[in-house]
Image (cartoon, grey):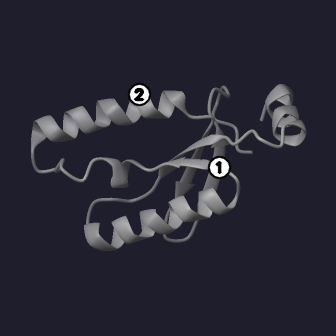
Amino acid sequence: MGKSYKKLLETTPNFKPIVYICAPYRGEKEKNVQCAVRYADYAYRHGAIPVTPHLLFPFMTDSKQKHRKDAMFMDIVLLGKCNELWVFGEKNYRRYACGNRGGRKT
């Protein structure tokens, strides 16, 4: 995490980072969407503004190539607007500051 970003978090009580929630989707979609809701709630409870693509585009399906391609494009655009990337999975959780070279963990 860059020094200026860290200082902003420490010194600005009204600052809330925009956090992209990255989590599994394929496979057990219903279960994974429920997990995404929990991950977004976790981010919210920890002072972040969650951006959770699983919950933003329910009308799109992976089975349609155009939907998948467009969703990936929109996800990349959204990720570019976020301060951090939080990666969730079955056994792990990782947090990355966006814009860091090499994707350094925070």
Tell me what residue is drawn at x 84 percent, y 26 percent: 4
Mark linked to residue 48: 1
Q: What secondary structure is marked by label 2? A: helix
Badge 2 vs badge 1, beta-carbon distance below 8 Å: no
User: Of label 2 and label 1, which has the lower sequence position?
Assistant: 1
The label nearer to you, 2 versus 1, is: 1
The extreme left residue here reads: 64
Residue at image location 49% in from the left, 70% down from the top: 90
Residue at left offset 65%, top offset 43%: 96
> Which picture quadrant has residue 15?
top right
For mark 1, does the 10 Å Cα neighbourhood hold few (<14), some (14 to 19), or many (20 or more) residues?
some
Q: Residue 84: horizontal and vertical position, in percent?
A: 62, 40
Task: Name the kind of residue labelled 2 in the image.
Answer: Val
- The answer to which image quadrant residue 93 occupies is bottom right
Q: Residue at x 83, y 36 (%)?
A: 6
- Which amino acid does the dot numbered 1 rest on? Ala
Front-most of 102 and 72? 72
Left or right: 100 in relation to 80: right
User: Separation of disc 2 and disc 1 at Cα?
Assistant: 19 Å
Q: Secondary structure at mark 1?
A: loop
Quadrant, the C terminus: top right
Instruction: Tell me if residue 18 comes above or below residue 21 in the rendering.
Output: above
Report the quarter where the N terminus lies.
top right
- Residue 48: x %, y % from top left: 65, 49
Query: Can residue 32 be spotted in the picture?
Result: yes
Left or right, 19 with reference to 63: right
Q: Circle 2 sits on which residue?
A: 77
Give the crowd class for mark 2: few <14, some 14-19, many >=20 residues within 10 Å. Answer: few
